[in-house]
Amino acid sequence: MGLLLAQTVGNPFASHIKSLTPKLLQFSVIGLGFGMNAHVAVQAGQQGLLFTVASIGGTLLLGYFVGRWLGLSRHVVYLISCGTAICGGSAIAAVGPVLRANDEAMSVSLATVFVLNVIALFTFPPIGHALHLTQHQFGLWCAIAIHDTSSVVGAAAAYGNEALQVATTVKLARALWIIPVSVGSALLFKQKGMKIKIPYFILGFVGAMLVNTFVPAAKPLGPVLVGLAKIGLTVTLFFIGAALSGRVLKSVGSRPYVLGVVLWIVVSAGSLYVILRAG
């Protein structure tokens, strides 16, 4: 619906929605924590750790070589690679200021990642069902192969509750890599005195999960808060779609999309292969 709005009458509240979307996503993710068990989350996070480290390093390295072959600027290459490797728009928003990337590089990178997010949101659940992936396998695959937290949660929620819990936990653990990658980016691009943007909302998610696990009195509130969180995530996806106007899509050009698609296919296929082999 958001995409349809953007391509027809346009979004009259684009500037307001731009600032509201990340806040709504963060509060919604915290709400999901009230439906999760800390013991299960720790187990899921441990299993996803090795995948996370290998995929982040491999994606950044592959992005460097493919980006050079395509002749893209190093800022655009690095931002799209970070968005693919870690957590989409959040990673780009965190790393961009560290690189002192200009508005054009930021816009191109964000648009590329958001378009691929939309595709993943609709294609991943049917692929998962076609391959008979378990809830756990699909949640793990979503967390590794889909860029933004919003689309990860949206696709996993469509697959099932267990997939949602696994995907959210692994994705947020993955999002913490924004911090070391941002520090490494400042050193790599020789930027001094840059402030690193820390995703503090993840602490809220962990806190909500701990309350749900260890505070019995809070149990009755869990289903209500999780229900509100899912509504918030649905609205977030609408806002993201409404921001992708025809002008934004056309301004990116073909080469950034090629880079984004190559990285996305390699990460998706590679992670799926490893997950299926692991059983």
Image (tube, rainbow, N blue to C red):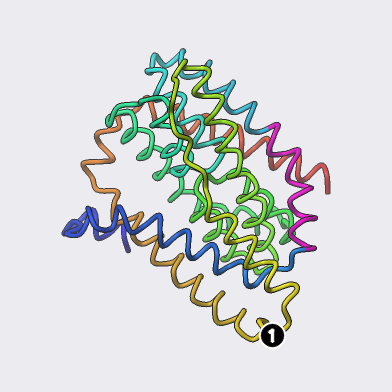
Q: Residue furthest front?
A: 193
What kind of secondary structure does the magenta stretch mostly adopt? helix
* Residue type for callout 1: Ala
Residue pictured at 51% horizontal, 32% vertical: 82
Percent coordinates x, y for residue 206 in the rendering:
64, 60
Residue 184 appears in which quarter of the rendering?
Answer: top right
Tell me if residue 124 is in the magenta stretch: no
Total numbered badges shown on the rendered structure: 1
Q: Is residue 263 left or right of residue 71?
A: right
Query: Which image quadrant for residue 130?
Result: bottom right
Whole-percent x, y for residue 8 in the image: 19, 57
Q: Residue at x 50, y 54 (%)?
A: 151
Residue 45 within the segment the image draws in magenta: yes
Q: Determine whether 226 is above or below 252 in the image.
A: below
- The local crowd at label 1, few if under 14, some if 14 to 19, many if 20 or more residues have their Cα within 10 Å, is few
In-front residue for pair 268/82: 82
Say which residue label 1 marks.
217
Tell me which segment is drawn in magenta.
39-54
Q: Nearer the viewer, residue 254 or 88?
A: 88
List x then y, in percent, for residue 68.
46, 13
The residue sitting at 38% across, 31% down in the picture is 97
